[in-house]
Image (cartoon, rainbow, N blue to C red):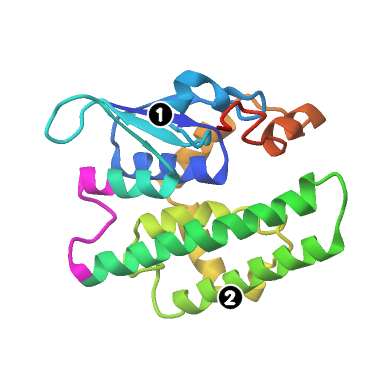
Amino acid sequence: MIDLFYWPTPNGHKITMFLEETGLPYTLKTINIGTGEQFKPDFLTIAPNNRMPAIVDHAPDGGGEPISVFESGAILVYLAEKTGQFLPKDLRGRTQVLEWLFWQMGGLGPMAGQNHHFSAYAPEKIPYAIDRYVNETNRLYGVLDRQLAAADYVAGDYSIADMAAYPWTVNWQRQGQQLDDFPNVKRWHETIKAKPATVAAYAKGDAVNRPAEMTDEQKKILFGQTAASLGTKA
């Protein structure tokens, strides 16, 4: 059984997409990031970076004590290796999937995240910052579109690379993008959106009770923390 510590964000959706695709049994444990549950000591033992998602696998391969994993990319690799699905075993296929997984982790996710922050959450609208991240998101959509010109999915067959990238394209309008400008991304996006596992994963997110708009206090919790404020500074 997998315990998934979760909130319905793009990174959270990655993991429910994988779990729904494979049918691996899991228990959803919500971590309300707007109220600061990610900073509680018991959660920090699982996710020392005070971010979700994180998992605890109570039945790891080979037996023994439960294994906890934090960081969405690491979780996807762990689960793919556990199930033998969505990560090729051959050297070339595995390498390509991992390339695009890390592309999402180091590029699409952080840049789209900053796009969201400065466009929607920052108390001051800074045109330079908004333009910077809208433009970089646009560039990354272009990279993805070129890659998808030759294949149905990012690395050939459907894989954890697609599950990682898709949730970061769901809010394309909020990111100042137009899917019609990227026909290959649009085709890929609509294909994944229609998958029964994707529908089920997002339904889990829709069932979580969360406010329609973020309050100033929630923004302070999410965006105002430092090492000193969390008591982690040496």
Residue found 61% across the figure and 30% down from its top: 33
Horizontal and vertical percent position of residue 26? 34, 28
Depth check: 179 or 210 in front?
Answer: 210
Residue 14 relative to residue 212: left or right:
left
Give the amino acid at mark 2: Gly
User: Tags 2 and 1 in contact by the CB under 8 Å rule?
Assistant: no
Residue 89 visible, this orientation:
yes
Q: Which residue is mark 1?
A: 46
Q: Residue at x 34, y 62 (%)?
A: 98
Q: Which residue is identified by label 2?
A: 142
> Is residue 122 magenta-colored?
no
Q: Residues within 10 Å of mark 1 (few under 14, many from 20)?
A: many
Residue 201 location (% of width, % of height): 46, 39
Q: Is residue 181 above or below residue 97?
A: below
Q: Secondary structure at mark 2?
A: helix
Task: Pick whichever, 195 or 168, lies toward us.
Answer: 168
Q: Which residues are magenta?
A: 80-91
- Residue drawn 49% across and 20% down? 41
| Residue type for callout 1 | Ile
Q: CA distance from mark 2 to mark 1?
A: 36 Å
**What is the quadrant of the C terminus in the image?**
top right
Query: Which residue is drawn at the image coordinates 41% and 80% (left, top)?
Result: 150
Residue furthest to the front in view is: 234
